Amino acid sequence: MKVLKFGGTSVAHAGNIAKVESIIKKASEKNKIMVVISALHGVTDQLIHAAESAADQNKHYIETLKELEERHLELVKELLPIFAQSSLLSFVKKHFNDIEDLCYGTFVLGEFTPKIKDRITSYGEFLSSRIIHAKLQSEGLDVSWMNSAERIVTDSNFTYAKVNSELTEKNIREYFMENHNRISIAPGFIAGDENGNLTTLGRGGSDYTAAIIAAAIDAEELEIWTDVSGMMTADPRLVSRAKPIPEISYAEAMELSHFGAKVLYPPTIQPVLAKNIDLRIKNTFDPEAYGTLISGHPKTSDKEDPQFAVGISNMDHIALLTLEGSGMIGVPGFSAKLFQCLNQEEISVILITQSSSEHSITVAINEKDVSSAKKAISSSFQDDLKLKRVEPVKIETGLCIIALVGDNMKSRSGVSAKMFGCLGNNGINIRAIAQGSSEKNISIVISEKDIRKAVNVLHEEIFESEVKQVHLYICGTGNVGTKLIRQIYDQSEYLKENMLISLRIAGLCNSRKMLFSSKGISEAEFLTLNENGIEFSEEKFADEMISGNLRNSVFVDVTASPDVPHIYEKLLKHSVNIVACNKIAASSDFANYKNFKNVARNHNCKFFFETNVGAGLPIIGTINDLIRSGDKITSIQAVLSGTLNFVFNHYDGSRSFSEVVAQAQREGYTEPDPRLDLAGTDVARKILILAREAGYPIEFGAVEIEDFLPEECMKGSVEDFYKALFKYEDHFRKLLESARYRGKILKYVAEFKDGKAKIGLQHVAPESDLFHLYGKDNIVIFKTLRYSEQPLVVKGAGAGAEVTASGIFADIVRSV
């Protein structure tokens, strides 16, 4: 014999009940079955709301009851043929009259007791099960109805009654000895005490009813039919890629359901576990789906290398209570006293953690119980508080519990490290940790605001190792920024297939507008940034990133703005990785530069700025590798400006210097104001950054800059600049001829040696590595303790939007 239980969503309306009927008919072809029915979806909550309104002297309860009555009456009319409706319609009306009388009594007394609550809420299951029984009867099926309140016997602990298993089992077996129908229908949730009072088994108690019946009759299997295809690896409302768990053990299911897996009411497991009855969770709306099989020996445990965890569960609205004091150390009975006073207030302790010094003990409880718990603890420990043996209880609210569950965790090393590592990388602070001695569960307490991020991070790390979701916030949509965005869109499929990374642009901004979408900004939306974006500010952009709290977030600065780096520290402190093309941060005051590096390290963040020097060339990465391997850089000689190299490679006297600079600007090698390149400021920043990365604490003011531009060229507008270049053509031609006279060429060179940096025009001989440098190429020559005679050379394209964007792209991939 099988037991089938259908939840509230499965019987929400006539359309769903038709699906339930189909499942019942199919199941009854092979077996006798017992069907346990929940109240129609939402009815129990509405009954409670009506009764509470009545207790508050609010006559709105009458309207609520009328709506509920009409819903049930309409359901009868939809389900039954006209000739079979009359008696059931009268039945429904009579019982709603009874409910209204009970609520009126509550209204008069202004009191809603647990006993009355059980009486009122029992009507939901009572009515739904009778309606479905009548529907099956009208179809000519061999069906009977069992009153659970007469068969399941409990104590008088109303709203959460404890079952008398021996008497209940005897009553249920007697029922089946007397009734031999193919199908039996019973209401879930409701029971009765030995005095004949109605009791209930707690919210979700219909699952428990079905398990009690299954255990009493030694059922072949218990099926819980709901609106999802089994227990999931995580709450699908939080994790879009959560997937059903095919098979799971009783112990794993109990752990998941205890810590918030809503698909199964926690007490349900115990009766079937005791009788070793398989429990299967199925989807009413996808009956062919496999669902989840809960048993003593799931097949997953037979695999050679089974998954160490089966699921992640979470519980909201948690508070932590901490009792601490020097008077607790070595004194027996403190913990027992704490638990006893909470037990007297019927406050359930969900999680416990204690310091090894016995100086403090922390328990997690439901947030709604905080006030009662505080009073109880203060009263119970009043003498200890007066003598200052313990401190007043500390209370933290706004928390949640996340539990990682799996039988195989006990046989795997590094599970905790993996769990805490991925959470730490995303800036999720853990307030408390607990792990059972069975090692089937690691539970953590975190801030409720981090729950979605934390569950997604864990799920991705443990169950979705094939693809890692990364959220990008890109500031700057100019030439380089646009190239980068195009590369991201173009490479998205390649990254998924070959690097298991999914890049999602969650935020975009330029100097005027910004746009956000946690689901990702499409190419089409990117093109409408100026039309559909909201007003931009650096602080607002940072605040949106922080409040969005998306996992694996990376901020990408593709600007030259001096203002954008002001938000770096805030972002790093919220565990947002930073990839910067902007040189301002790394070339600012040394103390500021070091602070960024330290904050990134302290918050386990990446702060990459490879494209600060040499566009996409691996220059900073090479320095970092040398230093990490124990080498020391003794000198650097470099051509670091693609713009200046282009200019001096093309200036041969056949055209004016101003014409060559204009060509460089047209081809995108200079800033909108070319003086920013030609004045040497940009090169000074670059050699400064390289020296700092090499380990030298140098300031920008210490970089010696040898000007080659006449002073007049630096005044006025860009147009004035070009006029001045033309005016001083003789000056530039003399520079060129002076080099040629010596058989050399002009290069704008940056040097660092003996702790000093300088930049300026130099005459470069043919035998120099700097001589054969063409177009917009950059070159960096490192001399180190290891590369003392034959230097290490990095050379290649050092300017251009495409190569710079590719360098930023590489940093993004490295950062995740």
Image (cartoon, rainbow, N blue to C red):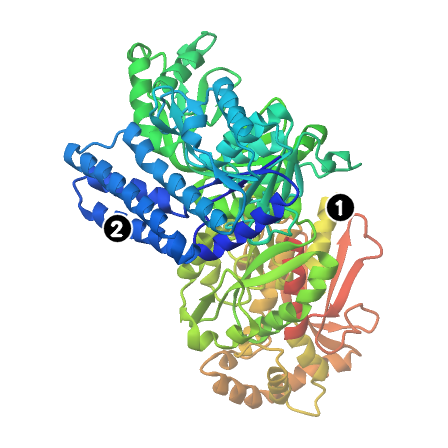
Question: Of helix, strand and loop, which one carries label 1?
Answer: loop
The mark that comes first in sequence, 1 or 2, is 2
Given residues 736 and 561, the one toward you in this image is: 561
CA gap, disc 1 and disc 2:
83 Å
Q: Is residue 143 above or below residue 511?
A: above
Q: Residue at x 58, y 27 (%)?
A: 217
Sort mark 1 into few (<14), some (14-19) or many (20+) by Cα contacts within 10 Å: some
Q: Is residue 800 above or below residue 446?
A: below
Q: Residue at x 39, y 26 (%)?
A: 192
Contact between marks 1 and 2 (CB within 8 A): the answer is no
For the image shown, how many numbered marks are present on the structure? 2
Q: Is residue 59 visible?
A: yes
Indicate the position of residue 240 as horizontal and vertical percent values.
Answer: 56, 54
Indicate the position of residue 404 as horizontal and vertical percent values.
Answer: 59, 36
Query: In the drawing, what numbered circle is on residue 590?
Result: none
Q: Which residue is mark 2?
A: 66
Identity, as a three-letter code, of the amino acid under mark 1: Asp
Q: Is residue 756 visible?
A: no
Given residues 224 and 776, the one toward you in this image is: 224
Indicate the position of residue 661 as horizontal and vertical percent values.
Answer: 61, 84
Q: Residue at x 51, y 52 (%)?
A: 139
* Residue 648 found in image quarter: bottom right
Given residues 738 and 651, the one toward you in this image is: 651
Q: Nearer the viewer, mark 1 or mark 2?
A: 2
Q: Which residue is mark 1?
A: 631
Q: Is residue 103 left or right of residue 123?
A: left
Q: Is residue 398 left or right of residue 586?
A: left
Identity, as a three-letter code, of the amino acid under mark 2: Lys
Q: Residue furthest front?
A: 83
Question: Of helix, strand and loop, which one carries label 2?
Answer: helix
Q: Residue at x 65, y 64 (%)?
A: 809
